[in-house]
Image (spheres, coloured by chain):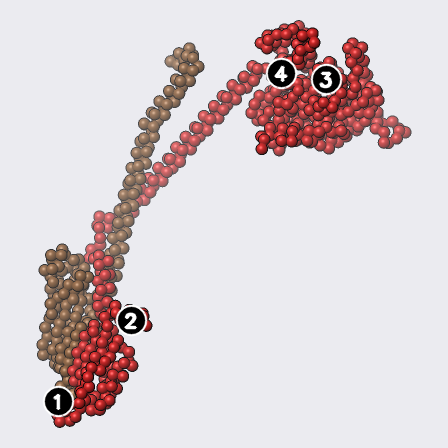
């Protein structure tokens, strides 16, 4: 994706500023926004409302304070050319070179091996005043200053390109002044300042611009509505007569002098947005008249709605670096001064930034140190509160809790008996049936018990066995033997029962398997 | 300002070099006399805080250990005799005999012989035992065994052997081995423990 660049063109017309923001992107050059700033409105604030921030700025000086001319010079080197141009300008203008802001553009060599150079000059004080008015609005670079005529040529070249007539004229009509520019291709044949403007027509109908940000209605002329005329016909504009008369004289003089016939007149400026100005001028001059109006997307506005921004548009084209006649009147000394000032401001900004970082870092570090000291004070206070405990490793009379817990667990495990002896005696008294009695008993808390006894009945031992099994206290109960004997000459059945307890681990495993 | 007047005659490049030198020296001096002491102060404060926090943690641990030890001792007291030191462990057998003698069921039996068995070291605790040769009714024996099971500190009947009297079937005689437990809170060196056992 190509990088786009935005530039701002500024035309100073009386107290107001006309702005045109132009972008050069993939689609070519396009007009993003136009706006009129009245006196007292802040340019920097308005710029912040723009869709893009311009990277370059150019503004224009009216022909009232400047001039533009094509000089024919002998062939010379680039170094000498500037000197020659200065000498020629001093000869042509009643001002010293120190009071002049000069700029030139080489058009090329003629058939007579003369170098044709377009030279623009303006009063240095005017240029500096203009720069002072435009500067301080947040622009990063040094604004360029050009002549309105050069801006119009650039605007015409951008809007009409090769489609325009070889010999044509551009008429810029403002409230208090006008400017006629006659071009033979890109060569300036005539650039004439006219003191006649459209400002005398107070209240004259003004077409509201469609594309523009704020159309100017100031200085509108008076409507000369003729009663009885058809309402669809626009009222006659009185300024048209005066302007057209002067334009006609100038064009005729040019025709007599050089034999150049103007094929078309392009109309722009505040006068162009007056209703009926186009056809009235065309009628009086007997020339086809078109609007020089930049439209959105870089096309020309056929309705002339943006014609008042033609100069601003041309300035923006020059700021973009796409001008066919780039003339920059900003003195190199001023550019250097501004750059030095900018460098100084940059250094100051960096210094301030570094200083603020250092101060902020110091404050943060100081705060951290203070917090640490606070934490230390807290710790020392806690230690002081704990008092004698702080010097002891453990409390008096306290043993190792782990050892005590282990001992408790070991004793608990040892005390856990599955069949206590008292319970076993109770079981036996229940399990032995009538006619069966105990003779001997051997009990071990871990392994179980062995019971020897006598029974008067043969089934007595088996009944005792079954009863013990049903109680499910022992893991295994077996009848080891049962024999008949004589006890005190009485026949009895002696028997032995083994009630076994498996070791804990084996018993637990057996229960789990079951 | 007069001392800096010579700078007016110095070339711009040299002036820039002098400026950079001054900035560098200022930085070094600032680091040496401001930065470094501050870092030292920071390190010292950190070390003190960590040391203090370790002390507090150690105290908390010792208090917790003591509480746990007290709880464990209280639990143990129901099952075993607690001895503060191994020295008092010599009295364990005598205490066991005394305990057995105070059991209510003991008085109902006719005790022919009552003798203590050697103290055994079970690593985590000590076990003392007493052997009793007795005679009496089955009911008295059962009552004695029940009392022994409910005694505090706990007693465990490890072995029991009895023989019924051929002439009086309800009367029995035999031997019972009762075991009691002891725990030493502060154990001595292994040599001391061996001597006690």
Q: Residue at x 28, y 44 (%)?
A: B52
**Residue corresponding to mark 4:** A329
Residue A55 position by quadrant = top right
Specify the subunit that label 4 lies on. Answer: A
In the rendered structure, find residue A470 and report the number of the disc placed on it: none
Return the disc, 3 or 4, that comes first in the chain's sequence.
3
How far is the residue under mark 3 from the one under mark 4? Answer: 23 Å
Q: In the image, is B161 to the left or to the right of B26?
A: left
Residue lying furthest bottom in this view? A489
Q: Secondary structure at mark 2?
A: helix
Which residue is under mark 2?
A510
Can you give x and y, in whole percent of width and height, for residue A340 in the image? 51, 19
Which chain has been coloured red in this picture? A
**Chain containing mark 2:** A
Residue at 80%, 25% in the rendered image? A278
Instruction: Tell me the colour chain B is drawn in.
Output: brown
Q: Write down the chain letter for disc 3.
A: A
Q: Whole-percent x and y of residue B112? A: 9, 79
| Residue B76 place in picture, x, y as percent | 22, 64
Alpha-carbon span between mark 2 and mark 3:
115 Å
Looking at the image, residue B165 lies above or below residue A138:
below
Reading the image, the residue beneath label 1 is B167
């Amino acid at each position: 994706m190509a990088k786009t660049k935005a530039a701002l063109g500024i035309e100073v017309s009386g107290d107001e500023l006309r702005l045109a923001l132009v972008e050069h992107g993939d689609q070519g050059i396009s007009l993003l926004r136009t706006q009129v700033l009245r006196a007292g409105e802040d340019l920097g604030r308005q710029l912040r409302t723009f869709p893009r921030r311009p990277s370059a700025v150019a503004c224009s000086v009216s022909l009232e304070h400047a001039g533009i001319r094509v000089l024919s010079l002998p062939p010379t080197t680039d170094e000498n050319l500037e000197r020659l141009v200065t000498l020629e300008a001093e000869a042509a203008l009643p001002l010293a070179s120190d009071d002049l802001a000069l700029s030139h553009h080489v058009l090329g060599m003629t058939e007579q091996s003369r170098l044709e150079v377009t030279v623009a000059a303006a009063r240095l004080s005017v240029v500096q005043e203009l720069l002072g008015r435009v500067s301080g609005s947040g622009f990063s670079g040094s604004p360029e200053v050009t002549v309105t005529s050069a801006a119009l040529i650039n605007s015409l070249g951008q809007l009409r390109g090769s489609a325009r007539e070889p010999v044509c004229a551009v008429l810029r009509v403002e409230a208090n002044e006008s400017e006629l520019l006659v071009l033979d291709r890109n060569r300036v044949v005539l650039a004439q300042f006219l003191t006649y403007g459209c400002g005398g027509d107070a209240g004259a109908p003004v077409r509201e611009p469609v594309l523009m940000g704020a159309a100017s209605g100031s200085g509108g002329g008076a409507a000369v509505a003729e009663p009885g005329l058809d309402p669809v016909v626009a009222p006659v504009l009185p300024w048209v007569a005066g302007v057209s008369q002067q334009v006609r004289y100038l064009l005729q003089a040019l025709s007599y002098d050089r034999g150049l016939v103007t094929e078309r007149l392009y109309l722009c400026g505040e006068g162009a947005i007056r209703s009926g100005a186009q056809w009235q001028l065309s009628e009086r001059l007997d020339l086809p008249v078109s609007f020089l109006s930049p439209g959105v997307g870089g096309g020309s506005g056929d309705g002339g709605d943006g014609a008042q921004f033609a100069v601003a548009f041309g300035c923006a084209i020059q700021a973009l670096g796409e001008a066919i006649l780039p003339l920059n009147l900003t003195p190199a000394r001023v550019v250097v001064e501004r750059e030095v000032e900018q460098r100084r401001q940059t250094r100051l900004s960096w210094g301030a930034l570094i200083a603020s970082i250092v101060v902020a870092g110091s404050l943060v570090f100081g705060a951290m140190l203070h917090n640490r000291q606070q934490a230390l004070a807290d710790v020392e206070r806690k230690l002081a509160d704990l008092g004698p405990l702080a010097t002891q490793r453990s409390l008096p009379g306290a043993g190792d809790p782990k050892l005590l817990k282990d001992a408790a667990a070991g004793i608990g495990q040892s005390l856990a008996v599955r069949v206590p002896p008292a319970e076993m005696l109770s079981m036996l008294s229940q399990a032995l049936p009538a006619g069966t009695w105990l003779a001997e008993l051997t009990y071990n808390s871990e392994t179980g018990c062995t019971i020897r006894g006598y029974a008067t009945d043969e089934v007595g031992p088996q009944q005792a066995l079954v009863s013990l099994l049903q109680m499910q206290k022992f893991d295994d109960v077996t009848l080891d033997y049962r024999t008949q004997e004589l006890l005190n000459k009485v026949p009895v059945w002696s028997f032995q029962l083994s009630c076994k307890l498996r070791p804990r681990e084996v018993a637990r495993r057996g229960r789990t398997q079951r | 300002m007069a001392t800096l007047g010579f700078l007016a005659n110095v070339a711009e490049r040299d002036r820039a070099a002098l400026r950079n030198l001054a900035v560098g020296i200022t930085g070094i001096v600032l680091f040496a006399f401001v930065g470094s002491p501050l870092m030292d102060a920071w390190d010292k404060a950190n070390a003190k805080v960590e040391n203090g926090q370790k002390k507090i943690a150690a105290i908390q641990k010792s208090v917790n250990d003591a509480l746990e030890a007290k709880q464990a001792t209280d639990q143990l007291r129901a099952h075993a005799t607690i001895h503060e030191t191994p020295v008092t462990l010599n009295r364990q057998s005598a205490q066991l005999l005394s305990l057995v003698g105070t059991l209510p069921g003991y008085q109902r039996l006719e005790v022919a012989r009552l003798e203590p068995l050697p103290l055994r070291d079970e690593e985590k605790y000590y076990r003392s035992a007493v052997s009793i040769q007795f005679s009496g009714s089955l009911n008295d024996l059962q009552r004695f065994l029940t009392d022994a099971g409910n005694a505090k500190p706990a007693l465990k009947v490890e072995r029991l052997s009895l023989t019924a009297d051929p002439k009086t079937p309800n009367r029995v005689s035999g031997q019972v081995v009762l075991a009691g437990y002891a725990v030493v809170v502060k154990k001595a060196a292994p040599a001391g423990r061996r001597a006690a056992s």
